């Protein structure tokens, strides 16, 4: 056991180094699959680069790849050796702090909306555009409510669901308005933005608090269904056929999809917002527009063509300020 403790920092640093060097291999394997091949040229390399930079944060963004490859193991070895030294020198205080930290994570997992208590009180102010802007006073969306939840606890914990205060009210008003029409559907909030906006990997937009992703509602054997976990990229890795089917038993719930988009359209108008863009796979729109609610959202500014990221597993809305 003593020998294991001695080499534990080396083992941890080795695990992170293997993760770092294994990411490109895993990305190549994943994009060799037909359903993920469209991500091979642009998105997969960009995501891998972002994760590798994060693994040597904060210096990774300033060091080019060949040099970064050389420092990843010693970088983490020094960190873990320092943590071990501090732990040894501060026992048993550090042990109590460790358990307190783990307890806090469990508490937040059970009651994630507690994070709303730490919200900044200053009003929201969006700067620039969704592609090159930032935001002051962004507000975190609640993790869950009566008929909605969030795509990922880690994503929520690390602050990836911040929006402008008017966008938050619009989204929550839309969920509330949808309860009566589709009472059994639970909507899933996707990624929205960071506390201060700015670059938001792997997204090209979501930079000034005015963008929202909502996962596509599903039916499984005719009943409302949701699936968002690590192995489908928290709902962002689903692939539907051109008829809107995920598999033999699971398909897009077009009725609920139309209801929530219409509710967002109406709530945006009530909260002084406009809808500047809606991204949802054009091949999948005809069944959406055929629903009762869908007939009322045909006039929204949809993108015309199918883009590389299909937006079949979620839809994206860019709001504007009136």
Image (spheres, rainbow, N blue to C red):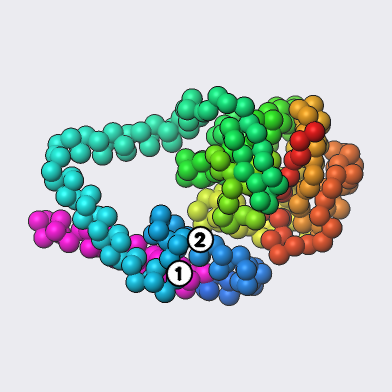
Q: Is residue 53 found left or right of 174 in the rendered image?
A: left
Residue depicted at 85% across the width and 38% down the height: 293
Query: Does residue 106 appear left or right of residue 258 in this picture?
Result: left
Direction left: furthest residue: 2
In the foreground, 125 or 84 = 125
**Which residue position is annotated with label 1?**
64
Q: Is residue 24 magenta?
A: yes
Q: Residue 241: x, y in percent? A: 73, 62
Residue 278 percent location from the top left of the image: 78, 48
Horizontal side of residue 246 vs 294, given as left or right: left
Pick whichever of labels 2 and 1 is earlier in the sequence: 2
Which of the pair 278/75 is nearer the observer?
Answer: 75
Q: Position of residue 306 (x, y in %)?
A: 78, 62
Placement of 202 over or under 109, stated as above or below: below
Q: Which region shows up in magenta?
A: 1-27
Residue 247 is at least partly visible in this image: no
Give me the disc on residue 50: 2
């Amino acid at each position: 056991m003593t020998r294991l403790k001695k080499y534990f920092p080396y083992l941890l640093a080795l695990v992170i180094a293997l993760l770092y060097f294994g990411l490109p291999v895993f990305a190549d394997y994943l994009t060799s699959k037909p359903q993920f091949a469209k991500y091979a040229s642009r998105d997969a390399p960009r995501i891998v680069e972002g994760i590798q930079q994060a693994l040597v944060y904060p210096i990774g963004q300033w060091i080019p790849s060949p040099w970064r490859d050389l420092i990843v193991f010693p970088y983490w070895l020094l960190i873990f050796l320092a943590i071990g030294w501090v732990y040894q020198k501060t026992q048993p205080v550090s042990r109590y702090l460790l358990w307190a930290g783990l307890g806090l994570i469990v508490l937040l997992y059970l009651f994630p909306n507690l994070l709303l208590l730490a919200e900044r009180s200053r009003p929201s102010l969006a700067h620039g555009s969704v592609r090159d802007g930032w935001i002051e006073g962004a507000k975190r969306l609640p993790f869950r409510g009566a008929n909605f939840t969030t795509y990922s606890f880690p994503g929520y914990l690390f602050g990836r669901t911040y929006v402008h205060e008017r966008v938050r009210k619009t989204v929550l008003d839309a969920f509330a308005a949808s309860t009566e029409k589709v009472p059994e559907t639970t909507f899933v909030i996707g990624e929205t933005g960071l506390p201060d906006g700015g670059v938001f990997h792997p997204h090209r937009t979501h930079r000034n608090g005015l963008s929202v992703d909502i996962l596509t509602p599903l039916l499984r054997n005719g009943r409302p269904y949701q699936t968002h976990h690590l192995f489908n990229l928290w709902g962002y890795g689903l692939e539907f056929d051109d008829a809107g089917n995920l598999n033999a038993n699971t398909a897009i719930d077009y009725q609920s999809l139309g209801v929530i988009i219409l509710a967002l359209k109406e709530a945006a108008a009530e909260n002084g917002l406009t809808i500047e863009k809606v991204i949802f796979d054009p091949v999948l729109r005809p069944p959406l527009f055929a629903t009762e609610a869908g007939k009322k959202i045909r006039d929204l500014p949809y993108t015309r063509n199918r883009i590389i990221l299909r937006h079949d597993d979620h839809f994206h809305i860019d709001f504007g300020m009136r």
